[in-house]
Image (tube, grey):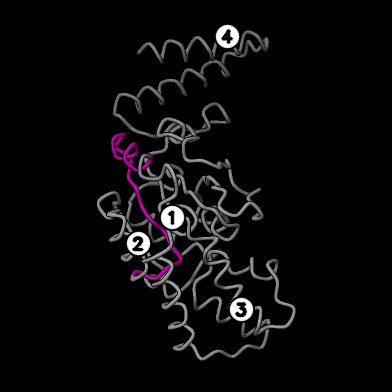
Amino acid sequence: MYMLINLVQDVFESKISKNIKNDAEINRNVAEIVIIAICHKRHFHKSIYVRGFVSRYVKSAVIFDMDGVLIDSEMLWVAREFELYVGEIPGWNRQKQKEFAGRSVDDINRILREKYAKDYELKAFRQRYRDLASDIYNTWTQLNPGVRELLSALRAAKFKVALASYAPRLWIDTVFGRFDLLREFDVVVGVDEVGGKGKPDPSIYLLAIKRLNIAPSEMVAIEDTPNGIAAAKAAGLCCIGYVSDPSYDRSKADMVITDFKQISPEIIRGL
């Protein structure tokens, strides 16, 4: 109730300061306050957007990417993929390789075929990436600093937590088993559950949203690549960009962080 009193006071002080004396305008704002009060009384987590008066939804769920966000594997993938193609594709460089970031294995195979006339047999191509994934995930990668602490804080704050990854479920299970992460997540979605459609296609996010059964406006995604950010935004999500590779463009993210200590459930809730 104290919050509502302050809200009423803020509205009327704002109208007086702007010299707006129209009774209909004041009545409209009183109606807005009544709506918000009803939502507050019924413990709804969303605010009501009315002509810019209240423009935010309280966030109650976070969807994580895996590679580059949960774990420090992004630069490992970059290095391994560069080694694969620099000797096979004339003029191959890091700028061309950036198109792979966040893409599924099948997407990468298609790009190589369409842009570089490299007709890799799909079954053998997938096995090549499975071998790379096994080495990276079982031997080299680690959790990014602060990830476990953030996951624990989100659970304590009653957030729903999901994973939406371009990786197949087998790779996800390897990572989750190694770092004991499964219990931290309510929903897990891999690319093989959406027909191999990797990011920037939003299908992975749309399935995670459906399974969480929460409005997109009440969720935040955490992504590290331009393709991942594009997928999250296409699904209607607010997106935090995490810096794994400093060369990636994260200008489309709503917020950019270099350390998970820069965010907390309170900060996320208010985005």
Q: Is residue 127 left or right of residue 174?
A: right
Give the crowd class for mark 1: few <14, some 14-19, many >=20 residues within 10 Å. Answer: some
Instruction: Tell me the residue that label 1 is attached to.
Output: 71
Depicted 143 relative to depicted 170: above or below:
above
- The answer to which of 15 and 43 lies nearer the viewer is 43
Q: Nearer the viewer, mark 4 or mark 2?
A: 2
Q: Which residue is mark 4?
A: 13
Residue 199, compared with residue 57, is above or below; it is below
Looking at the rendering, the stretch of residues picked out in magenta corresponds to 150-169
Q: Amino acid at mark 4?
A: Glu
Q: CA distance from mark 4 to mark 2?
A: 54 Å
Whichever of callouts 4 and 2 sits on the residue coming sooner in the sequence is 4
- Mark closer to the chain start, 3 or 1: 1
Instruction: Give x and y (percent) for residue 263.
Output: 47, 35
Is residue 167 part of the magenta span, yes or no? yes
Query: Are the two marked residues, 4 and 2, in contact with CB atoms closer than 8 angstroms?
Result: no
Crowding near pointer 3: few (<14 within 10 Å), some, many (20+)? some
The answer to whether 42 is drawn above or below residue 222 in the figure is above
Q: Kindly indicate whether the residue at mark 3 contacts the one at mark 2 (C-beta within 8 angstroms).
A: no
Q: CA distance from mark 1 to mark 4?
A: 49 Å
Residue for badge 2? 175
N-terminal of the pair, mark 4 or mark 3, is 4
Secondary structure at numbered mark 1? loop
Separation of marks 2 and 3 at Cα, in angstroms: 27 Å
